[in-house]
Image (cartoon, rainbow, N blue to C red):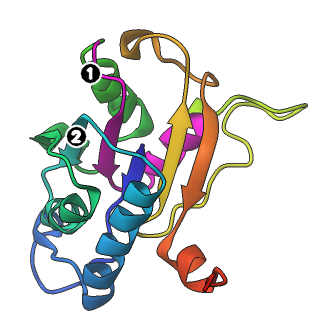
Amino acid sequence: MLLRHAKSDWPDVPDRDRPLAKRGQRDAPVIGRWLHDHGYQPEIVICSAALRTRQTWDLVAPELGGSPSVTFEPRAYAASAITLLYLVRELPAACRAALLIGHNPGVSELASNLLEAAGDETPGSPGLRFPTAAAAILEFDGDWAALSLAQARLLAYTSPGDLRRAPRLE
């Protein structure tokens, strides 16, 4: 599971210390409920150590239920797709489901590069758009340590905007 942090504010603080904006505080629990309602429960969470990613996790976690192991990972802050891939490869083999909470462009590039090419497309084409608080659920065969490009299948994807636009079933 890949999740971009929720919408952040832009106060006059170092980038790593930017908090969530009010919209981000509203959107993060919505994504947590979507993950829960669709049965996506991580055993392990790797979360960037930046304030906005930690706050995103703090708002997603109560909606998920369960109590996954969480690591606030400094290497995930502003990380490239390849750095994020290395972090994922470090997950224990016994782990069946993990959630990575990070930043763009790394998160969207990782998702796009992990997806299997369809037809004449090359890996990573055309790519997933990853607005704030967007989540992608990917599946692959094999161990985390062997994960490489173009090996995953997209099971589900959503963003808070998609959920707001979705018709409500009553």
Q: Residue at x 37, y 56 (%)?
A: 36
| x 73%, y 42%: residue | 125
Extreme residue in the bottom direction: 22
Q: Nearer the viewer, residue 80 or 108?
A: 108
- Give the residue type that dot 1 points to: Leu
Q: Can you say which quadrant of the picture contains the C terminus?
A: bottom right
Please provide the residue range marked out in magenta: 94-113
Residue visible at 41% across and 30% down in the picture: 82
Q: Place residue 69 in its image quadrant.
A: top left
Q: Do the residues labelled 2 and 1 touch (CB within 8 Å)?
A: yes
In the picture provided, is 55 more to the left or to the right than 130? left
Q: Locate residue 28, reporting x and y percent.
A: 31, 71
Left or right, residue 25 beside residue 55: right
Percent of width and height locating residue 61: 20, 58
Tag 2: amino acid:
Ile
Q: In this view, does 9 lie above or below 155?
A: below
How many numbered marks does the figure carry? Answer: 2
Q: How crowded is mark 2: few (under 14 residues within 10 Å), some or many (20 or more)?
A: many
User: Foreground residue, 120 or 15?
Assistant: 120
In space, the residues marked 2 and 1 are separated at their CA atoms by 9 Å
Q: Mark 1 points at which residue?
A: 91
Question: What's the mark number on residue 46?
Answer: 2
Quadrant assignment for the N terminus: top left
Where, by quadrant of the figure, is residue 132 drawn? bottom left
Q: Tag 1, which secondary structure?
A: loop
Residue most extreme to the right? 120
